[in-house]
């Protein structure tokens, strides 16, 4: 019994130490990226991305989307974003939604764009919430719905996206006071439910 506890303790310690090392190496890649040292960022992230780390995959997707340190390649960006998005990475989900909206590296599909943007939005990612509001106001992949656009822009603003707040104020001028009140109730319901009732 005592040996099992010791082994369990050692296993947990090794997992924690491994997790700390991964985080340090990922951070080293991030610091290199911020400094414009894309070669070092790539060398730090590629092994982790290849082994399934969602953060590294998302970062590689961004590098390929922007052409930072690698030739710009939307198809490769979509590959890395998809791997990360399927693991729940909200930035990858949002960026993948943008690729589907624009048909960059993937077949253009507003419905698939909305799917990924919604997943990121329901995890509280302000940028995705702002983007999703645009999809609703323009009727891309979803029926045109000013109430939902207002709701997502309100949530995006609540989560720190100042552009979403500007969009919300703009759409409010095209809505009746009753619709604005209803949209505000939708925002409250969404927040109270931790994004399960949006």
Image (cartoon, grey):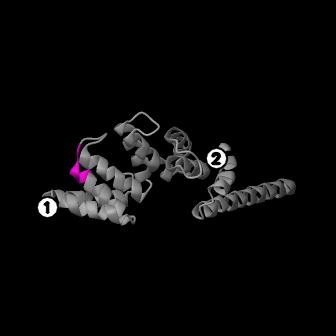
Q: Position of residue 86 (x, y in %)?
A: 53, 42
Between the C-alphas of marks 2 and 1, the distance is 49 Å
Q: Please rate how many residues cluster around mark 1, counting C-alpha atoms within 10 Å: few if below 14, some from 14 to 19, many from 20.
A: few
Q: Position of residue 113 (x, y in %)?
A: 39, 42
Residue underneath mark 1: 177
Q: Position of residue 111 (x, y in %)?
A: 35, 38
Q: Which one is in front, 132 or 182? A: 132
The local crowd at label 2, few if under 14, some if 14 to 19, many if 20 or more residues have their Cα within 10 Å, is: many
Q: Quadrant of the N terminus?
A: bottom right
Q: Residue furthest right?
A: 3
Asked if residue 62 is among those painted magenta in the image, a careful observer would answer no
Please name the predominant secondary structure of the magenta segment in the image.
helix
Please report whichever mark, 2 or 1, sits nearer to the chain's N-terminal start: 2
Q: Is residue 52 above or below residue 23?
A: above
Left or right of residue 147: residue 64: right
On residue 49, the disc is 2
Residue lying at 33% horizontally and 62% vertically, measured from the top left = 163
Which range is magenta? 144-148
Query: Residue 162 or 69: which is nearer the viewer?
Result: 69
* Residue at x 77% of width, y 60% of height: 13
Res 181 visible: no
């Amino acid at each position: 019994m005592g040996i099992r506890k010791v082994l369990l303790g050692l296993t947990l310690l090794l997992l924690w130490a491994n997790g700390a090392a991964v985080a340090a190496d990922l951070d080293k890649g991030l610091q290199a990226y911020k400094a414009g040292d894309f070669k070092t960022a790539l060398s730090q992230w590629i092994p982790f991305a290849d082994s399934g780390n969602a953060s590294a995959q998302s970062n590689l997707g961004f590098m390929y989307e922007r052409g930072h340190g690698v030739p710009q390649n939307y198809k490769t960006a979509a590959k890395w974003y998809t791997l990360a998005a399927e693991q729940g990475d909200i930035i990858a989900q949002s960026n993948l939604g943008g690729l589907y909206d624009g048909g960059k590296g993937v077949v253009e599909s507003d419905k698939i764009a909305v799917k990924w943007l919604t997943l990121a939005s329901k995890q509280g990612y302000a940028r995705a919430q702002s983007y999703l509001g645009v999809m609703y106001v323009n009727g891309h992949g979803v029926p045109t719905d000013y109430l939902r656009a207002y709701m997502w822009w309100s949530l995006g603003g609540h989560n720190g996206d100042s552009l979403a707040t500007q969009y919300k104020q703009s759409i409010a001028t095209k809505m009746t006071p009753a619709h604005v009140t209803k949209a505000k109730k939708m925002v409250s319901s969404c927040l109270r439910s931790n994004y399960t009732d949006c």
